Image: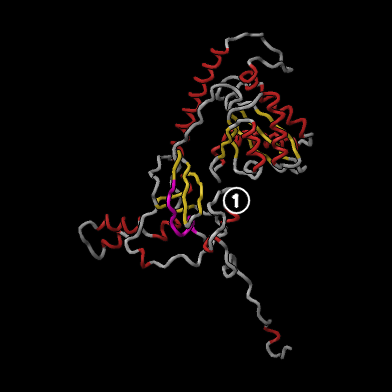
Amino acid sequence: MKRRLRTKVWWPGIDRDSEDVCRKCHPCQVVSQLSPPEPIKSTDLPKGPWQQFGADLLGPLPSGDYLFVVVDYYSRYVEVDIMKKTTSDRIVKSLHRMFATHGLPLQIVTDNGPQFISNEFKDFMEQEDIEHSRVTPLWPQANGEVERQNRSILKRLKIAQIEKRNWHDELSDYLTMYRTTPHSTTGISPSEMLFKRKIRTRLPMLDTMLYDPDDLDQEVRDHDAEKKGTSKYNADKTRQARESEIAEGDAVLLKQHAENKLLPTFKCEPYQVVSRRGNSVTVQKDGIYYKRNITHVKKYEQEQDSHTREPCENLKYNDVNEDRDDYREPAILNDDDRATDDVKLRSTRVTKLPSRFVDFVMT
């Protein structure tokens, strides 16, 4: 735009004015790319083992089974329970058995799956006096410890499938190997950090070294901080991460689920930021609230002549399907958030009479 204007006209501040027009162009903002992510915020190491852990469901597998995976944030110790159903009562029973072995934690971190937002699960958390934290919807990275473990488990199950082995046995072998191997972040095996002793395996033990738990804890914390710092620096540099300036009260555009290639990156109308906590923001429009990661919203620049712009009335979105993890106040959606019958999401074939029947009278 600036090059084209320079060939015809000039006025003081021509570059600044051109950039300002492009920055505040509403259609350009709606179809633009997402903002760079914020720098990584590493989870602080808990004070001790089995105080805080993440939980998630992996599956379904071809056998119809699901894996309920729990990872302790301190020791990185993994518990896996195989289940056919993923109802809330089945999750509660599984946690009951784990708590009978390891005791009650202080906090559980999960996603927004229906098993974890039900009243039954909420009552169980209150009964056991456990804080239940749910990550930001559509942002599984917030529970990265268990998501990373899911990837490793799934990789081992795929290998068992290729080699036609019993995946139950292979899963047990993997857990034994993982629990007794020094972790790349802490430098100590998960079982040793959780139980304060070395677990015997088929590999011969070189010694029966005793240690001071206090010295072990300090060594783990130093190793954990060093590894997390290095990982954070490399990841932030690669992703060109920077702090977002979005604050409470700002007008923002909200990322939408792309149902076809021509849908814009963001929803057409701007939303207002209600609150921000870390890299999680809550936005609202017409009394409907959405909780998102800061990467899924983009600050909106208001056009000076926005009153002359036609609203995006021809674009309708089905928020019920794409925002399954959201909470809304009130729960009833308005007409702008429902898909209408007159919107065609894909092309249709035009039906007409074949040319060979042109000279015929059809009844």
Location of residue 249 in the rendering, given as x and y in whole percent from the top left corner: 39, 49
The residue sitting at 65% across, 45% down in the picture is 114
* Viewer-side residue, 199 vs 300: 300
Location of residue 347 in the rendering, given as x and y in whole percent from the top left corner: 60, 68
Image height of 186 relative to 290, above or below:
above
The residue sitting at 57% across, 39% down in the picture is 134
Looking at the rendering, the stretch of residues picked out in magenta corresponds to: 264-274
Q: Is residue 267 magenta?
A: yes
Location of residue 182 in the rendering, given as x and y in whole percent from the top left corner: 61, 21
The residue sitting at 40% across, 40% down in the picture is 243
Q: Which residue is mark 1?
A: 324
Q: Main secondary structure of the magenta part?
A: loop
Image height of 307 relative to 297, above or below:
below
What's the amino acid at mark 1?
Arg
Location of residue 75 in the rendering, given as x and y in whole percent from the top left corner: 60, 23
Residue 247 as seen in the image, left or right of residue 67? left
Q: Is residue 37 magenta?
A: no
The residue sitting at 65% across, 14% down in the picture is 197
Q: The N terminus appears in which quarter of the rendering? A: bottom left
